[in-house]
Image (cartoon, helix red, strand yellow):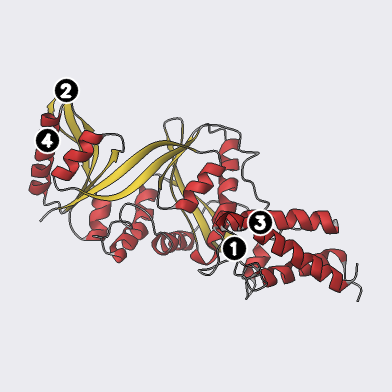
């Protein structure tokens, strides 16, 4: 993570995103946090960020801004960022889920144990997602967004993410990627083969039971508001909306 | 219980459960060919799962046999039992026949 600062009250943090660069074929960056004391300082910070992106040859940059941060949202748009998506940070904080949505099923979850399992995870990730910061951006070709999700799986593996899968007849049909975060877990990505998409509703309660049994008291996930099925499902699993975020993108050049 | 009578009861359970699940959408036509999955279905994934849970509950109450509709065998079939109201009814009937032995004619 890199930082551009005017002073200790006005700075931003960003990172190059080589995993997205591989999918899109040009340099990309993500603005992770912006701290500002007033509008002129914010404007100056975004000028400096633009200059840095220019120097790095970045052609696509993106940020998720707090939906309640109106000065930031205005400044992003004045600096050429456009609206791409809205997402929710949803969290489960140890509330009893046993009485929540718990359909009857005999499915058993396991860890993927061979490269064929991971190839299926990559395929599901590529073919079965329609929501997300890149899928919902009309300026990004759908095949690029799909490729980015395909490549993301191995990036997650390298970064230490864990996976759980449900297999049918030896073939992965559904998966969940997650990672420890603070004292809880962050759900990074989950997917089910599109021919049996409603099975996702059965896997989630199984995942949550497993996490609760392992003693986790907090689980978070970022969900697109356009993915109504997922938002409704999380709500039934006693997740609560913690924060709304507006995704802005900027194409340079 | 005679087979025809059982068939009718199963269909009624599924049609009623389908109607209840789709009620919030103004109630979709609950005929036997109503799609449960795919682009023609008017149920969301969660509504379908709720409907399936309701069917399992009503079948157990009516026939005294617990069944689990969503299982690996169901999905390994050439033709999914979750296509339509009728295909699900046939599947429920099969599961009950398997559990109780061949029904009387």
Mark 2: which secondary structure?
Answer: loop
The residue beneath circle 3 is: B20
Identify the residue at image location x=69%, y=59%: B17
For the residue pair A5 and B37, the one nearer the viewer reads as: B37
Residue A28 appears left or right of A232: left
The residue beneath circle 2 is: A8
Identify the residue at image location x=56%, y=42%: A237
Label drawn at residue A168: 1
Tell me which corner region of the image, top left, top right, bottom left or bottom right, holds residue A170: bottom right
State which mark lies toward you, 3 or 1. 3
**Is disc 2 on the same chain as disc 4?**
yes
Using a 10 Å C-alpha cutoff, classify the residue at mark 4 as few (fewer than 14 neighbours), some (14 to 19) or many (20 or more): some
Q: CA distance from mark 2 to mark 3?
A: 58 Å
Labels 2 and 1: the sequence-earlier one: 2
For the residue pair A9 and B5, the one nearer the viewer reads as: B5
State which mark lies toward you, 2 or 1. 2
- Residue reaching furthest to the front: B26
Of all chains, the one bearing label 2 is: A
Q: CA distance from mark 3 to mark 1?
A: 31 Å
Of all chains, the one bearing label 1 is: A
The residue beneath circle 4 is: A43
Mark 3: which secondary structure?
Answer: helix
Is residue B6 positioned above or below A70 on the image? below
For the N terminus of chain A, the image quarter is top left
Mark 4: which secondary structure?
Answer: helix
Q: CA distance from mark 4 to mark 2?
A: 16 Å
Residue A33 appears left or right of A199: left
Is residue A242 positioned above or below B29 on the image? above
Please provide percent x and percent y for residue A17.
24, 48
Mark 1: which secondary structure?
Answer: strand
Please provide percent x and percent y for residue A247.
28, 46
């Amino acid at each position: 993570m890199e930082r551009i600062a005017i002073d200790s009250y006005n700075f931003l943090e960003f990172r190059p995103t080589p995993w997205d660069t591989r999918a899109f074929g040009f340099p990309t960056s993500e603005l992770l946090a912006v701290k500002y004391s007033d509008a002129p300082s914010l404007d100056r910070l975004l000028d400096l960020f633009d200059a840095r992106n220019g120097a790095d040859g970045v052609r696509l940059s993106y940020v998720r801004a707090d939906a309640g941060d109106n000065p930031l949202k205005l400044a992003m748009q004045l600096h050429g960022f456009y609206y791409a998506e809205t997402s929710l940070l949803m969290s489960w904080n140890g509330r009893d889920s046993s009485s929540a949505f718990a359909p009857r099923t005999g499915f058993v979850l396991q860890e993927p144990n061979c490269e064929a399992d991971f190839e299926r995870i990559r395929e599901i990730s590529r073919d079965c997602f329609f929501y997300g910061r890149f899928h919902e951006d009309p300026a990004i070709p759908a095949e690029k967004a799909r490729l980015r999700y395909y490549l993301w799986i191995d990036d997650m593996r390298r970064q230490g993410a864990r996976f759980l899968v449900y297999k049918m007849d030896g073939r992965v049909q559904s998966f969940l990627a997650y990672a420890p975060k603070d004292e809880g877990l962050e759900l990074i990505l989950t997917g089910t083969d599109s021919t049996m998409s409603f099975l996702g509703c059965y896997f989630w309660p199984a995942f949550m039971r497993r996490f609760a049994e392992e003693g986790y008291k907090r689980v978070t996930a970022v969900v697109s508001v356009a993915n109504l099925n997922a938002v409704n499902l999380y709500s039934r699993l006693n997740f609560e909306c913690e924060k709304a975020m507006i995704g802005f993108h900027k194409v340079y050049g | 219980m005679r087979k025809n009578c059982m068939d009718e009861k199963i269909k009624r359970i599924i049609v009623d459960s389908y109607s209840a699940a789709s009620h919030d959408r103004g109630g979709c036509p609950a005929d036997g060919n109503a799609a449960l999955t795919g682009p023609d279905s008017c149920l969301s994934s969660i509504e379908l799962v709720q409907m399936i849970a309701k069917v399992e509950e009503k079948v157990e109450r009516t026939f005294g046999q617990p069944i689990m509709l969503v299982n690996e065998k169901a999905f390994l079939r050439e033709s999914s039992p979750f296509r339509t109201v009728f295909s699900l009814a046939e599947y429920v009937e099969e599961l009950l026949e398997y559990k109780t032995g061949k029904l009387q004619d």
